[in-house]
Structures are given as C-alpha cells and as structure tokens.
Image: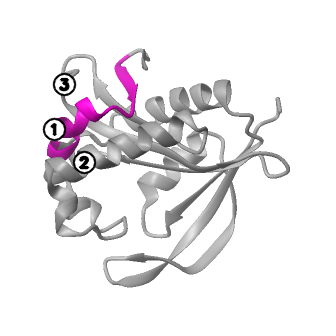
C-alpha cells in the first residue's frame, strides 16, 4: 500500500523495496550505529533485506506489526526514512512500540515528523490502538523533538535498556495515548 503527504510518499513493506532499502541502510550505516542496535554483516546484503521485507509483509497481514518506508515526491525511488510499529498487541493492552529513522542528509526539514504523523494515522485505521510507546536515547535531542511534536508525553527513564554500539544505553520513555479509543 502507498499513500502520500504534502511532500512525501509512504509505502508499506514489499520485497520490491529491497534494493532501495539496502542503499538506504548502507549509506547511513555509521550514522545509525550511533543510535540503534548493531546489525550483523549480512544485514547489508540484498538477500537479507528481501527476507526482512517478506517477514514484515507477513507480520503486517497478521496484524502483528507495520513498517512504512518513505521518500520525497521528487525522488520516489530513494528511501529517506523508515517507521515501525512492532509488537502490536490487542486488548487489554491495545498498544504498540514505535520507532523511526531518517537519512542523515535529510534531517532538519520536518520530513520525519510529517511521515510519522501520517503513519500513525494509518496504523490507527487498521489496528485498534490505545497506546503507542517509544524509547529514545537521552543524547538524541532531534528524536526527542519529533516525539514531542507528535504529542508524545515523556514518562520517565529506562536505564541501560537497549544495547547500542556495544553498551547498554539509557533511554527516555515516551507514550502517546489515543483519546479517540
């Protein structure tokens, strides 16, 4: 499925995106390793990206997760960001965990906020979600600003919560509550 915002094209997981996704992750590998868990070397192969996209597609059909990849309308074939909703859980939790990343060369233009807002609206259309949770490194002010622009509330600190670049790092915990649930 594909949909648009004012400046962006968003699309759900599809194995046909594997080449563009490999380019995206390869171009940003060093940058992302500062903020995300490390990936094995095979992650940076076309076969691995194809398998990931196949699994993401299956999990979306089953209602377990949703992934969105976005591009600028001027360059629809070039992925500049990704958004994930994982561990979509039904009541009594009615929740999901939300994550995103953006090409290092595309930061500071509001693309990630625009794409995340649209993806949140889309996931709320097909999944009965009350709570969206997110974690962000304490030293990542740009990511914090995105969450706050989207209306997430800071709930506290998760100490040594996620292994990033060989160290368990502290993260702020944020949540967004669906007032229309």
Q: Mark 3 and mark 1 in contact? Answer it, CB < 8 Å.
A: no
Q: Indicate which label's residue lies in the foreground, 3 or 2.
A: 2
Which quadrant is the N terminus positioned in?
Answer: top left
Residue drawn where x is 20% and y is 17% of the image: 74
Residue drawn where x is 71% and y is 48% of the image: 95
In the picture, measured across the screen, residue 110 lies left or right of residue 144, that is left
Q: Where is residue 161 in the image (x, y as percent from the top left)?
A: 54, 77
In the picture, measured across the screen, residue 20 lies left or right of residue 87, that is left
Q: Mark 1 and mark 2 in contact? Answer it, CB < 8 Å.
A: yes
Which quadrant is the C terminus positioned in?
Answer: top right
Q: In this view, does 83 lie above or below 126?
A: below
Question: Does any portion of residue 124 appear in the rendered image?
Answer: yes
Residue highlighted by disc 1 = 19
- Image quadrant assignment for residue 158: bottom right
Of the image marks 3 and 1, the number of the one nearer the N terminus:
1
Magenta-highlighted residues: 7-23
Of the image marks 1 and 2, the number of the one nearer the N terminus:
1
Q: How crowded is mark 1: few (under 14 residues within 10 Å), some or many (20 or more)?
A: some
In the picture, measured across the screen, residue 79 lies left or right of residue 62, that is left
The circle drawn on residue 49 is 2
Q: Is residue 19 above or below residue 32?
A: above
Q: What element carries label 1?
A: helix
Which sits in the foreground, 170 or 181?
181
Residue highlighted by disc 3 = 77
Q: Where is residue 118 in the image (x, y as percent from the top left)?
A: 52, 26
Q: How many circles with numbers are drawn on the protein?
A: 3
Q: Is mark 3 on a helix, strand or loop?
A: loop
């Amino acid at each position: 499925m594909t949909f648009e915002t004012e400046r962006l094209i968003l699309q759900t997981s599809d194995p046909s995106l594997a080449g563009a996704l490999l380019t995206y992750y390869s171009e940003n590998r060093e940058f992302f390793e500062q903020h995300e868990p490390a990936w094995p070397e095979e992650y940076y192969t076309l076969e691995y990206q194809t398998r990931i996209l196949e699994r993401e597609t299956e999990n979306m059909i089953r209602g377990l997760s949703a992934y969105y990849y976005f591009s600028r309308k001027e360059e629809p074939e070039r992925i500049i960001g990704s958004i994930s909703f994982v561990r979509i859980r039904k009541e009594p939790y009615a929740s999901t965990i939300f994550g995103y990343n953006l090409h290092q060369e595309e930061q500071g233009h509001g693309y990630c906020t625009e794409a995340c807002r649209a993806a949140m609206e889309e996931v709320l259309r097909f999944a009965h979600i009350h709570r969206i949770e997110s974690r962000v490194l304490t030293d990542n002010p740009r990511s914090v600003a995105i969450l706050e622009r989207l209306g997430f509330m800071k709930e506290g600190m998760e100490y040594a919560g996620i292994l990033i670049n060989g160290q368990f790092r502290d993260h702020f915990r944020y949540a967004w509550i669906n007032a229309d649930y």
